[in-house]
Amino acid sequence: MSVRGAIEERLALMAPARRLRLALAERAVSDFAGSRPVRVLDAGCGDGLLALALAARHPNWTLTGMDLSEELLRGARERASNRSLANVSFEGADLTRPLPDSGFDVVMALECLSEIPDDRGALRSMTGALAPGGLFVMQAPDRDWKPVLKGSAGTWRHEVRHGYSQAELGEALAETGLEGIGIEPTYRSTAAAAQELRDRVKDRGLALRAILFPVMAASVRLERWGLTGGTANALFATARQPLQGDGNHGRHCD
C-alpha cells in the first residue's frame, strides 16, 4: 500500500459513525466469542473496512463480507491481499435471496437495512445464514433522526426508508424467530455533529482532513463516555438464533 492510501483508509475508518459501529459490533461479538474462533458474516459490507479491521484485530476469527456491489468488493479484496489477511474473504450476494454460505456463528448487518427495499426478505436471508445459537448484530438509523448542524443532509446515503422506531425494529427481528432481542439507542449529538462535519470535507484535500482527525477521534471517545446528548440517530440491536430443539418460535427462513 502507498503511504497516501494507508492514510486515506485510516481517515475513512475514523469517520465517527463508522468508528462507533465498529466499536459496538466488536464488543458484542467479542463478548459472544470469548477466546474461541468464530465465523462472522459482514452482510452489506460495502468497502470492507469494518471486516478488514476485525480480521486484523482477531486472527482467530474467520470473516466473510458480502455485498451486491462488485466494484466495492474488488477494492475490499485488494485491501485484504495488501494486508496479507488470510482470515477474511469477500463474496457477491443479493441479501434478499438465500445467501451462498451459511452456518455462521455471527451475522452483522451494520447500516445496510435502510438501503434495501425488501428489508424483511433481507432479514430472513441474513438470519437464515446463522448457525443455531448464533448471534445477530445490527445497526440501523432511527426513524426520527435529524441532522445536528444547519445545512447538513437530512437523508442517509442511499436510503429507501428513513429508519425504524425501536418497536418497528423489534417486531421485524421477532418475525424471523430470533430470541433475546436487545435494542439500544446510539450515536447521539456529539458523534453526529462530528460526522456531519466530516461529510462536508470528505472530498477536500488530504491535509485538511488530516487536521480534523483529532476532532473525529475525540468525538468518538466522548460519545462512548456518555458525554453527549439529544435524540439518538441510530439503533443498535443484538439477538440470538434459537438452538435446535427449542422449537421454531415463528421462525421463517428462505
Image: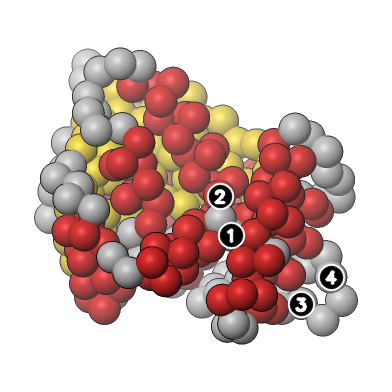
Q: Residues within 10 Å of mark 3 (few under 14, many from 20)?
A: some
Where is residue 173? Give x, y as percent. 47, 42
Direction front: furthest residue: 3
Q: Pointer 2: what residue?
A: 19
Q: Pointer 3: what residue?
A: 152
Q: Residues within 10 Å of mark 4 (few under 14, many from 20)?
A: some
Mark number, residue 149: 4
Residue drawn at x 27%, y 71% as measured from the top left: 75
Distance (Cα) linking label 3 and label 1: 16 Å
Camera-nearest label, 4 or 2: 2
Amino acid of disc 3 = Ser
Q: Earlier in the sequence, mark 4 or mark 2?
A: 2
Task: Please report contact status of discs 3 and 4: CB closer than 8 Å, yes or no.
Answer: yes
Q: Secondary structure at mark 3?
A: loop
Q: Earlier in the sequence, mark 3 or mark 2?
A: 2
- With respect to residue 219, does 40 lie above or below? above
- With respect to residue 121, does 217 lie above or below? above
Q: Secondary structure at mark 2?
A: helix
Mark number, residue 15: 1
Task: Please report contact status of discs 2 and 1: CB closer than 8 Å, yes or no.
Answer: yes
Quadrant where the N terminus is found in the figure? bottom left
